[in-house]
Image (cartoon, helix red, strand yellow):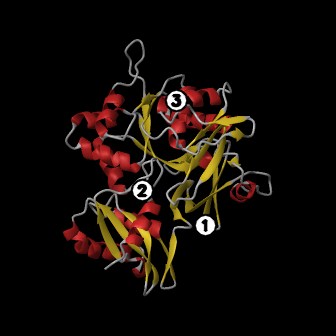
């Protein structure tokens, strides 16, 4: 089967190419800017290439059956209706918005260009209705940074607030959602569903900690594993990595090793963070995801990002990067951060630095570009 990029990465071109690929009426499409061409396994719909937040590229082969299975499972959980595409169409979250719209026999509404609250609100409130005037349930998918921008705008723009309330469900994925942001959305009346998944699972497959129909999950040696019809076929041209990340168990069941730590309590998954996002500070293992979760619970720091940095005394340490923080408040915030993290995670986990920036560097998916932040810190060591 042939693999080709769409005519362009314009969302409308991606919608057209993906529709043909999912229906089997066109070639599989290469997404993510890699421009891959060549042959892929029969039944492939898309190859999604992304560097992720760590800068490690991967090209994930996703079949038509996997995308369709995931889309139908989502409809069974939250309902079917019209979808608004507000995340990049070249990432798996955008791909799934398109496929969910297609299985509902609807054209997705699209917000193009850099994300801004006003065009989003206009598109949300202009979603299609039934011929008889009855409102069709509408849905969208966002990353936490987009939701926070919308909530900030909604404080002084009633139209944005109305748009957020208009959705039957707003799927939030891609990274952890700060509790303070979740509480703000709930207070506004926005119906938020936290999703967990990746390109390797055709997008989110665990909603609010509960797997979608047909999805199995377990924790082995502290790592979250997922299984079901939504699993990708593997990594293009990398059979060794595919075999390692998608192992078969003794019963022949195929699993995806997420690389995330977690626990399952009463059937609900709680993800504790990336297993590889750990530093060793003074001989103690420190999860930077736990540190970041504690920091984001501090009022005003919901968008903060924690990244590793060398430490001459302890070997490794961490820095908290805060967008929009006045330089004069850095030391005060550092003292607060160290106290909160020390109480929540332990003294060895206390960050060594707070860095104020005007704006966080971001990937096209909307996630913070952690590789860029690490490079920034390397160029500007503490004086």
Determine which residue is flagged by label 2.
Answer: 368
Nearest the viewer among 227 and 377 is: 377
Answer with the quarter of the image where residue 137 lies.
Answer: top left
For the image, the number of numbered tags is 3
Residue at coordinates 46% horizontally, 65% vertically from top-left? 289
What distance separates the C-alpha of mark 2 from that of mark 1? 26 Å
Q: Earlier in the sequence, mark 2 or mark 3?
A: 3
Q: Judging from the image, what secondary structure is the residue with disc 2 in?
A: loop
Residue at coordinates 31% horizontally, 43% vertically from top-left? 150
Residue 216 is situated, as x and y percent measured from the top left of the image, at 65, 49
Question: Is residue 375 depicted above or below 90 in this figure?
Answer: below
- Image check: 300 left or right of 234? left
Determine which residue is flagged by label 1.
Answer: 222
- Crowd rating for badge 3 (residues with CA inside 10 Å; few <14, some 14–19, many 20+): some
Determine which residue is flagged by label 3.
Answer: 13
What distance separates the C-alpha of mark 2 from that of mark 3? 26 Å
Q: Earlier in the sequence, mark 2 or mark 1?
A: 1
- Crowd rating for badge 1 (residues with CA inside 10 Å; few <14, some 14–19, many 20+): some
Judge depth for marks 3 and 1 and give the one in front. Answer: 3
């Amino acid at each position: 089967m042939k693999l080709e990029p769409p005519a362009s990465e314009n969302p409308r071109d991606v919608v057209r190419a993906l529709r043909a690929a999912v229906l089997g009426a066109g070639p599989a499409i290469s997404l993510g800017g890699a421009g891959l061409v060549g042959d892929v396994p029969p039944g492939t719909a898309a190859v999604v290439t992304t560097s992720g937040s760590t800068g490690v590229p991967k090209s994930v082969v996703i079949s038509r059956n996997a995308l369709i299975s995931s889309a139908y499972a989502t409809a069974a959980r939250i309902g079917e209706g019209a979808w608004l595409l507000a995340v990049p169409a070249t990432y798996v979250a955008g791909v799934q918005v398109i496929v969910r719209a297609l299985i509902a026999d609807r054209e997705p509404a699209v917000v193009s260009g850099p994300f801004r609250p006003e065009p989003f609100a206009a598109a949300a409130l202009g979603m299609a209705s039934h011929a008889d005037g009855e409102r069709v349930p509408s849905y969208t998918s966002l990353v936490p940074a987009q939701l926070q921008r919308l909530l900030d705008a909604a404080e002084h723009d009633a139209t944005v607030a109305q748009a957020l309330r208009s959705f039957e469900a707003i799927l939030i994925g891609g990274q952890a959602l700060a509790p303070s942001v979740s509480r703000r959305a709930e207070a506004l009346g926005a119906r938020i569903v936290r999703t967990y998944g990746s390109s390797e699972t055709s997008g989110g497959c665990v909603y609010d900690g509960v797997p979608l129909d047909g999805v199995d999950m377990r924790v082995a040696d502290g790592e979250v594993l997922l299984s079901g019809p939504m699993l990708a076929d593997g990594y293009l041209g990398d059979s060794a990595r595919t075999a390692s990340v998608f192992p078969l168990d003794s019963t022949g069941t195929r699993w995806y090793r997420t690389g995330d730590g977690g626990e399952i309590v009463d059937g609900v998954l709680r993800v504790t963070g990336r297993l590889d996002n750990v530093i060793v500070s003074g001989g103690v293992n420190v999860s930077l995801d736990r540190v970041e979760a504690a920091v984001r619970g501090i009022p005003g720091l919901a968008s903060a990002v924690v990244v590793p940095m060398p430490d001459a005394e302890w070997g490794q340490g961490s820095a908290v990067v805060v967008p929009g923080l006045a330089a004069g408040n850095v030391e005060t915030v550092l003292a607060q951060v160290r106290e909160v993290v020390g109480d929540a995670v332990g003294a060895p986990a206390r960050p060594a630095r707070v860095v104020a920036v005007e704006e966080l560097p971001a990937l096209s998916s909307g996630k913070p570009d952690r590789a860029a932040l690490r490079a920034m810190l390397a160029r500007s060591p503490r004086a």
